[in-house]
Image (cartoon, rainbow, N blue to C red):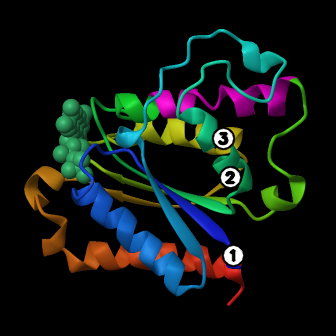
Amino acid sequence: MGKKIIGVLGSPLTEGNTAQLLEQALKGARDAGCETETISVSSLEFDACMEMMFCREHSTCIIDDDMQKIYPTFQEMDSLVLATPVMTMGIPGKLKSFMDRFQVFFMAKYLRKEPLVDKNLKKHRKGLFICISGMNIPDVFKGVKMSVHAFFDIIDCQYSDELLINDMDTIRDIRTRQDLLDSAYKKGYDLGKALSGR
Ligand SMILES: Cc1cc2nc3c(=O)[nH]c(=O)nc-3n(C[C@H](O)[C@H](O)[C@H](O)COP(=O)(O)O)c2cc1C
């Protein structure tokens, strides 16, 4: 069985520009011999973290919602591709809530020192970050990158590569930029190749 790469889509548009870049990256990973699965955050039903702190002592969250099926997937995956647009200079709200719910992994790793990710998996788990912004201004990716670095640390994925594309308000349709779609494919392929050893 091939190594498993999870793609997480932070845009609510499942056929939008972010989604197409993510699919190109995952296609590259499949061509390199990996299995892939896409999680569209907007299709999940879950609450924001309520700070009930159940996860201080338990390896899960007390809130019984769709995050319960996400946690095992994130424990077992071999790598992650996280793709999102910038919204209000940061991570879109629902994706940010999704990331916050990994407090379950944070508490296990940093407080109880009983990480939920097996140490053999941790050795090779990588994170590829794909992000697009409407504007072409300095520091447009600064906020999202800080959050994603923290998130990748929490879930034990090494921040290994990124594809940051600004000025989407001018580009409008990513299908007019085959070079950018090819970049996404190549980064996914390289990630998959590093895992599958081909
Ligand atoms: C609610 C909202 C907030 C946004 N905020 C920003 C922003 O702060 N900076 C920016 O550069 N682009 C911003 N954008 C533009 C998106 O990043 C851009 O349109 C992107 O291409 C959307 O990707 P998608 O079509 O794949 O969802 C915002 C878009 C929306 C809908």
For label 3, being within 8 Å of ligand 1 is answered no
Question: Residue 39: x and y, percent?
Answer: 46, 51
Question: Residue 90: x and y, percent?
Answer: 37, 33
**Type of amino acid under label 1:** Leu
Q: Quadrant of ligand 1?
A: top left
The disc at residue 71 is: 3
Q: Is residue 197 visible?
A: yes
- Classify 10 Å Cα crowding around label 1: few (below 14), some (14-19), many (20 and above): many
**Quick check: 156 left or right of 27?**
right
Question: Residue 89: x and y, percent?
Answer: 31, 32
| Residue wearing tag 2 | 157
**Type of amino acid under label 2:** Cys
For label 2, being within 8 Å of ligand 1 is answered no
The residue positioned 87% from the left and 61% from the top of the image is 120
Q: Are marks 3 and 1 in contact (CB under 8 Å)?
A: no
Residue 95, located in which quarter of the rendered image?
top left
Give the magenta-colored segment's residue range.
97-111
Q: Is residue 108 magenta?
A: yes
Residue 124, located in which quarter of the rendered image?
bottom right
Residue 27, located in which quarter of the rendered image?
bottom left
- Disc with the residue nearer the chain's start (2 vs 3): 3
Q: Is residue 150 visible?
A: no
The disc at residue 61 is: none
Question: Residue 5: x and y, percent?
Answer: 59, 65
Tag 3 secondary structure: helix
Q: Is residue 172 magenta?
A: no
Nearest to viewer (mark 3 / mark 1): 3
Q: Considering only vertical position in the picture, is 83 above or below 88?
A: below
The disc at residue 195 is: 1
